[in-house]
Image (tube, helix red, strand yellow):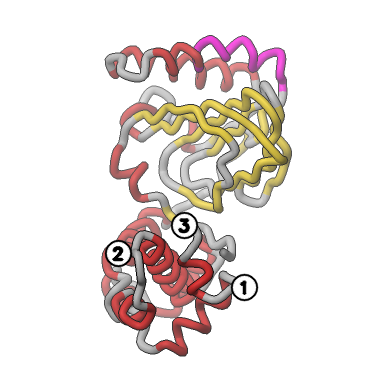
Amino acid sequence: MKNIPYYELNHDKADSVEFFRANNSDTKPHFHRCIEILYITGGSVACRVNEESFSCEKDEIMFVHKCGVHSLVPTPHYADFVIIIGPRYSSDFASIFQTKTLPAHLADKAFNRTLLPHFKALNRQKNAPDLVKKGYINIIIGSLLDHYERKPVTPTPNIGTIVAALNYIDDHYREPLSLERLSAVFGYNKYYFSRLFNTYIGESLNGYINAVRVRNLVSEAKKMENPNLSELVFAHGFDSMTTFYRNFSKYYDRPPTEVFQER
């Protein structure tokens, strides 16, 4: 599927600390309002954070500032620790990250290894009290800020509006949606709203809406024994089969029946 960045609503709604181990995740471009840290424990992975591409190897770290669009591709295998830090858990250092951030690629392996015990401790204590988890996170973030040179944050003054619009699309994609409807909902001139959306997402509003429809349609169809394509098409907000096929072909080079059979 074409790599249009999508918003991960679940992370922002949870406003918690998520810590887990991952292996060989081929992660499409996405973003959320949480800080994300990946410590590579083995292998290598091709990383992209906003416009920066790099390879992360064992004992290197990928750092993603809130709302940074990021993706991962195994090359060919990797394993990592993942920390996703909700706003409530980042209050101790939130003021720092308003104007400064860390580089996306933190490549001092010897230094990073000094932090590995804290990642392992979080892994052992997934059900620890919040205060304990926050303590480990503060040690990790504080150490990274002290060791690595900070860089200016690219301002995102209208990100709240864009996130609200993406939430609205997720809730209403089965309905008729248009630039006129969404710009009216959020109180903007439609031409300004269109430019604003394209600037942050890198895709037109209609293109993003149809990408959401295609993604959700495919996800639902894969869970069905004998999916009825025409019923799915109209249930997911498309106004015709022609519109569906035109948008589906932007993201897949095989017919729907073949894509639906993948599990």
- Residue at point 26%, 72% (across, down): 185
Disc ID at residue 253: 1
Task: Say left or right for 52 vs 172.
Answer: right
Residue 224 part of the magenta segment: no
Few, some or many residues within 10 Å of mark 3 (<14, 14–19, 20+): some
- Residue at point 45%, 11% (across, down): 121
Q: Are marks 2 and 1 in contact (CB under 8 Å)?
A: no
Disc ID at residue 6: 3
Does the magenta stretch mainly form a helix, a strand or a loop? helix
Q: Which residues are magenta?
A: 108-119
Q: Nearer the viewer, residue 51 or 29?
A: 29
Task: Say left or right for 43 vs 158.
Answer: right
Residue 118 part of the magenta segment: yes
What's the residue type where badge 1 is placed? Asp
- Residue at point 53%, 70% (across, down): 258
- 231 up-or-down from 102: above or below: below
